[in-house]
Amino acid sequence: MRAVRILITNVQLNHRSGTEIVVRDLEAELRRRGHEVCVYAEYLGLISDEITANGGHVVASLDAMPFVPDVIHGHHNATATTAAVHFPTTPVILVCHSRNFWIDMARGVPSVHRYVAVDLNCRERLVAEGIAESSIDVITNAVDLERFVFRPECAAPPRRAAVFGNNAHDGGFVTFVRAACAQLGIDLDEFGSGIGRTEHHPELVLAGYDLVFAKARCAIEAMAAGCAVIAVDEAGYGGLVTADVVDQMLDWNVGDRCLQRAHDVAAIVADIDRVVSDDAARVSVRVRERCDLRRAAFAYEQHYLSAVAAGPPTTGPAANWHDAHRDVLTFANELECRLRVGEGAWSMPPLPPSVGDALHLAAHGALRRVAPGKRYSVEVEIRNHSREQLSTVGSTPVLLSYQWLHPETGAITVANGERSALTRAIAPGQVHHQSMVVVAPVEPGEYSVRVTLVQESVMWLSDLAKPVFVDLPVTVGRPADEWLLSGMARLASIRVASSELTHAGAVANLGFVSSPMPAMLTFATAARFLDAAVRVGCAAVIVPAGLASAVPEGLGMLIADDPAAVFWRLHEALVKRTDFYGRDEPTSIHPSAHVHATASIDRNNVVIGAEASIGAGCVITGRVRIGDRVSVGAGSVLGASGFQTARIDDRLVEFTHAGSVVIEDDAAVFANATIARGLFRQATVVGASARVGNNAFVSHNSRIGPDSVVGHGAVVNGNVEVGVGVWIGPGARVSNNITLGDGARIDLGATVIGSLAAGEHVGGPPAIDHRSVLREVASWRSRSRRR
């Protein structure tokens, strides 16, 4: 290969920063390959000393150059520009090493034949500065493999670890690394100028460690040495570099764009536990293949020869520094103007694949049944914990979109949904809420709509290794058959009796015959249950084929081999895939209400009235309405699911509770109490000025009357009707499906197994007449004294 005279520029050679190590290694390799090389830097020091000690040539003034270069390998705007002006007919290969550092600005450097980016992040910078993409190549940072001592395999679990990087310092990310290593009993050493311990020969010492915490060139060197590497730095946390992600991370130089997550001790511990010797060895082999210094030097040689063959710069050499300075000022003015538009966003570079670790998408209030082809809106929440700004600007904007999928197979039925622009730029750390447009498929059926983000011409974020999306079940059907038995049958995949075709009334409720509701669908497995369904006025019933002939004319009917199982499946489908039990509505909290900061309240379907007080650690979930001046003590749970267990296909399953909880005005729920929401469309109610004591439990569909008291630790089971002014003593147990009349009293610890009349007073386990209890107690005491 023809030898050329090469000038390498760098702003300094007096520290062990990334570009300085690059210059040292590349200069030595180019000389080894027969080229004549000189390095120019304004500030000389320990790295320039190493170069000259190895036989290289370094100058601090271009007047001291030993030759006129054939090509300038330029690092950093100022030094590259100075060299280009000094040698105006020499072409420049300009290399960008940083996305953000101002000295890596490409604009203003004259005589450039070709641009090189060390990773995709730097390539984006060059494009954003207006450099034509066709003029840019990517050459990954390289390691002089001949300098390194390699370890055949790292220990797993790791025994020795090191922090390696100049950005490490006390109080930063190192604090999290120290805590994780201490938790696992791993010895940890720390290297870097920020810690005050610079390692001058990392190529010799890295192989002594099983695990290294580093980023960028330091991470690449550690992987080349055979160490397992966790990517981390002050910028953020990137996690364990494994064989399935190493190429992706090398594309981004294992740099800032790979460090999308927050520092977290638990995450570091989990990644250390994932270290596998064989995988670390595969990573090391791949890094040596891609990041071999000889490979990089060969790539640069091709650029040098191309530049020399092209002759003097075709753009016209710079006669002095004024033109370059003017170009930089013009770009700075242009950049300022752009940044004043669109909330500070003027371009949207391609997002790194690691961004999936740090974005979260949620949807609220979405319809679960829509007409075919219907255009409707979905409220979405985007949590941006990445280091990227998301914006609908530029040639690769980020937008909201969706796909329609089969709910069981996941097959995509509509692949490319309409786009909705972000209503504002979402900066790192921000939470954003907005609505997006969704159009339903034209064919009726059961679907899932996958709501996600898409960056045009780059990727769907739902396709990332850590995908960003939320799936919403949706039934697409004609309004005319909404909640008819035919529509419900499709949900549960069961047969529809011919009688329904002539008596196609709508179903408004599901339920058991013990708690009838209007237009209700229930199930019957025997004649007596069918009779009960007819007697309470059900609109429709699910029966086995053998019972179909006994269903009276006018009663809607579905036929199934296992009516109970079909009833459960139908209920679950209605809850999860339709709006049968009500559409989600945004939570509403009155401005005068006091909600403790540690309380957890669903974003939808909760209403909290004026002057209500919600204590620390409360959980309010499901459909819950809390009246004015209600007090809810610390740790209480409102809207929990109660027991409603069924045996389906030889396994126990629970009915999802789809009803609600209502706490009326001036009521009080004391600490750690639990109130379950209704099972079907019913509500569990705590009446006005009623009291529910500490650790008490009120199950589904029960109604606690006004001014009544449920004592500490008491249990009121499902479907209990409690009258006005009832006293249920501490520790009492009330059976299900009974009524307690107005003013009834239950002594502490009593077990009530039957309904009580108004004013009745019971005690004892099981509960009997209060006077009988007193006589029995007196008799027990008398016998005890005689003994």
Image: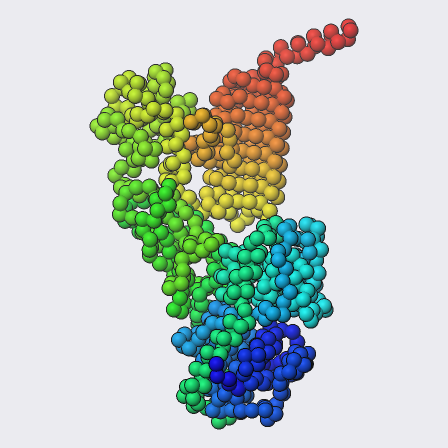
User: Residue 263, can we see it?
Assistant: no
Q: Residue at x 42, y 77 (%)?
A: 135
Q: Nearer the viewer, residue 152 or 299?
A: 152
Residue drawn at the location 56% of the way across and 37% of the way down: 637
Indicate the quadrant where residue 287 lies. Answer: bottom right
For the point 65% across and 74% down, the residue is: 16
Q: Position of residue 650 (x, y in %)?
A: 45, 25
Q: Measured along the vertical axis of the image, is residue 23 above or below residue 634?
A: below
Residue at x 39% of width, y 25% of height: 564
Q: Nearer the viewer, residue 336 or 416?
A: 416
Describe residue 219's horizontal placement relative to residue 318 as left or right: right
Examine the image and state in which quarter residue 292 appears.
bottom right
Where is residue 457 drawn, in percent x and y? Answer: 37, 64
Residue in front for this viewpoint, 249 or 632: 249
- Name the foreground residue: 343 vs 330: 330
Q: Determine whether, in the image, residue 581 is placed left or right of residue 263.
A: left
Give coordinates of residue 261: x percent, y percent: 56, 58
Q: Residue furthest left?
A: 502
Indicate whether 564 appears above or below 289. Answer: above
Quadrant of res 749: top right
Residue 342 in the image: state x and y as whole percent: 43, 69
